[in-house]
Structures are given as structure tokens and as C-alpha cells.
Image: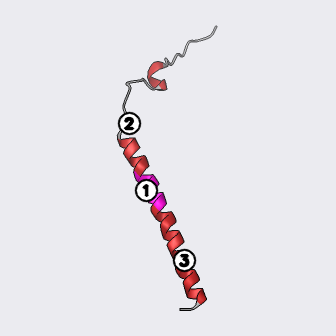
Amino acid sequence: MSELGKSQIRDVHTRLAGAEDKLSQLDDEAARQANVVDLGMPSFSQITVRTTADQP
């Protein structure tokens, strides 16, 4: 195998390892999102009151 071929194979392995690492990070993030607990906090729009008072 030529040196160019070996270099290309190493490059592919490096990219594959990076892609697998990114997929692992995404899996971890998805697992954390699945475990989010709703604290029942109202949203901003639920706690604010819209007023349209006429100013004299």
C-alpha cells in the first residue's frame, strides 16, 4: 500500500472517530433532555398582564 493510501485511511479513521464522538455527545444530550423535570413555573406570558389604559 502506498504512503498516500495509508494517509487517506488514517484520515478516514480520524473522521470516523470524530463522528462517533459527536454522535455520543448527541445521544447524551438527548438522554438529558428526556430527564428534564417540569417545575410548573409559569411562562412570562402567563404571568404578565396586558393593559391598554387610555392616557388622558
Which residue matches tag 2? 36
Nearer to us: label 3 or label 2: 3
Residue 42 point in image, percent of width and height:
42, 23
How many numbered badges does the structure rendering display?
3
Relative depth, front residue between 42 and 56: 42
Circle 2: element type: loop
Q: Earlier in the sequence, mark 2 or mark 1?
A: 1
Residue 21 point in image, percent of width and height:
48, 60
Mark linked to residue 10? 3
Task: Give neighbour class at mark 1: few <14, some 14-19, many 20+ (Cα, 10 Å).
Answer: few
Circle 3: element type: helix
Task: Give neighbour class at mark 3: few <14, some 14-19, many 20+ (Cα, 10 Å).
Answer: few
- Vertical order, 13 against 27 (above or below): below
- Vertical order, 47 against 19 (above or below): above
Residue 38's image quarter?
A: top left
Residue 50 point in image, percent of width and height:
50, 19
Q: Amino acid at mark 2?
A: Val
Q: Are marks 3 and 1 in contact (CB under 8 Å)?
A: no
State the residue at coordinates (47%, 25%).
45
Q: Is residue 23 magenta?
A: yes
State the residue at coordinates (41%, 49%).
28
Region in magenta: 21-27
Residue 40's image quarter?
A: top left
Which residue matches tag 1? 24
Task: Give neighbour class at mark 2: few <14, some 14-19, many 20+ (Cα, 10 Å).
Answer: few
Nearer to us: label 3 or label 1: 3
Q: Hey, which residue is sitting farthest right in the picture?
A: 56
Q: Are marks 2 and 1 in contact (CB under 8 Å)?
A: no
Relative depth, front residue between 10 and 35: 10
